[in-house]
Amino acid sequence: MNLTELIADSKANHKYFEIICSKYSKKINFLVKSFNIELYRNDLLLFLWQLIKKINSSDFKSEQALHSYINISLKNYCINLYNKYHKNNRITYNSLLTDIEIDKNFSYNTIDNSSLIFDDLIVNLSEKQKKIIIMRYKYCLTDYEIASSLHVSRQAVHKNRVAALNKLHKSLIS
């Protein structure tokens, strides 16, 4: 039985829709995995059922054209599903504010537990190493910028930073 006949028969008998679903099961599985929309597989099947119900197979010149139309419709529906349910996971910045400026603006009244933990970790370091670690990881400065502000060479900053990280590593392990 060809696809055109299956679509015509599925409008009267739901058993034929199951046959159509089995024909498109590989495509549906591929799309669901590609777009990471496992939770919305039933939505995709519902869309296929609605699509089959409203398709007029006589509008298509060939069975291949009908098959292509269904494939493209499924793919476009998956794209729409993905965009609809995953748009909250995408963050776009439309501002000149950087992450650091955003943090400064919105966290000035709260006590950050991570900064308390950070301060506890670096307590065993020398003053120079503390300054270097704070400048590097709290203020995101490069070794060159730290060297300029402390009036030492970049190599000295690097050596002190590596030594401090080794001390921190040893203290965390023990």
Image (cartoon, helix red, strand yellow):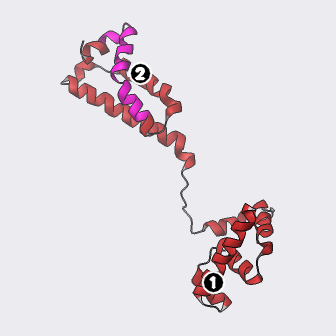
Q: Which residue is drawn at 69% across and 66% down?
A: 169
Quadrant in which the N terminus appears: top left
Q: Is the magenta stretch mostly helix, strand or loop?
A: helix
Residue 49 marker:
none
Q: Can residue 87 be seen in this view?
A: yes
The answer to whether residue 144 is above or below residue 57 is below
Residue 81 location in percent, x, y?
A: 48, 36
The amino acid type of the residue labelled 1 equals Val
Q: Is residue 104 visible?
A: no
Q: Distance between the Cα atoms at labels 1 and 2? A: 65 Å
Residue 11 location in percent, x, y?
A: 36, 11
Q: Which residue is drawn at 71% across and 72% down?
A: 167
Closer-to-camera residue (89/34): 34
Quadrant in which the C terminus appears: bottom right
Closer to the eye: label 1 or 2: 1
The amino acid type of the residue labelled 2 equals Gln
Residue 50 marker:
2
Residue 79: name its quadrant: top left
Does the magenta portion include 173?
no
Tell which residue pokes out farthest to the left in this image: 61
Residue 104 location in percent, x, y?
A: 71, 68
Q: Is residue 163 left or right of residue 63?
A: right
Q: Earlier in the sequence, mark 1 or mark 2?
A: 2
Magenta-colored span: 8-32
Q: Is residue 28 left or right of residue 152?
A: left
Write down the residue under mark 1. 157
The answer to whether residue 145 is above or below residue 30 is below
Tell which residue pokes out farthest to the top in this image: 13
Q: Is residue 161 left or right of residue 57?
A: right
Residue 24: name its quadrant: top left
